Amino acid sequence: MSDGALVKGLRSGIPYTPGPYTSSWDGPDDDGRIAPDGSYQVRVLSNNVQYAWQGVVGNMSDARGV
């Protein structure tokens, strides 16, 4: 929308290799309602987050501070 609100998530949680892609949208928003006529912007968000366990974070000392 013109205020920047997300109308429809076209692809989510799908890994892609680098390169060009095409997609289409037939008008409904994420709730299934037909979105109003108008201009819409496409925004691409990308990340490559990987989780690696590095141990425990916190205070492991006893009550005496040892």
Image (tube, rainbow, N blue to C red):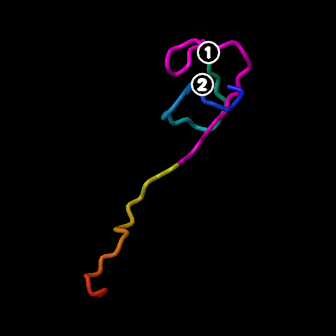
Residue 65 in picture, x, y percent from top left: 31, 86
Q: Is residue 13 above or below residue 33?
A: below
Question: Quick one: quadrant of the N terminus?
Answer: top right
Q: Residue at x 37, y 69 (%)?
A: 57
- Using residue 14 as the reference point, say whether residue 58 is left or right of it: left
Seen in the image, is 41 located left or right of residue 64? right
Q: Nearer the viewer, residue 61 or 26?
A: 61
Residue occupied by mark 2: 7
Crowding near pointer 1: few (<14 within 10 Å), some, many (20+)?
some
Label the magenta part by its dominant secondary structure.
Answer: loop
**Residue at x 56%, y 14% (from the top left corner):** 28
Quarter holding residue 17: top right
Front-lying residue, 19 or 7: 7
Q: Do the residues bearing badges 1 and 2 touch, measured as CB atoms within 8 Å?
A: yes
Determine if the magenta segment contains residue 11.
Answer: no
Q: Which portion, as a residue range, is magenta?
A: 26-48
42 shown above or below 64:
above
- Secondary-structure class at tag 2: loop
For mark 2, does the 10 Å Cα neighbourhood hold few (<14), some (14 to 19), or many (20 or more) residues?
some
Three-letter code, disc 1: Ala
Q: Position of residue 30 (x, y in %)?
A: 52, 22
Q: Earlier in the sequence, mark 1 or mark 2?
A: 2
Cα gap from disc 1 to disc 2, whole angstroms: 8 Å
Query: Within the image, what quadrant is residue 66 found in?
Result: bottom left
The secondary structure type at the circle numbered 1 is loop
Which mark, by number, is residue 35?
1
Q: Is residue 22 above or below residue 47?
A: above
Residue in front for this viewpoint, 59 or 23: 59
In the orientation shown, which residue stands out farthest toward the right? 39
Of the pair 46 and 4, the residue shown nearer to us: 4
Image height of 59 relative to 15, above or below: below
Q: Amino acid at mark 2?
A: Val
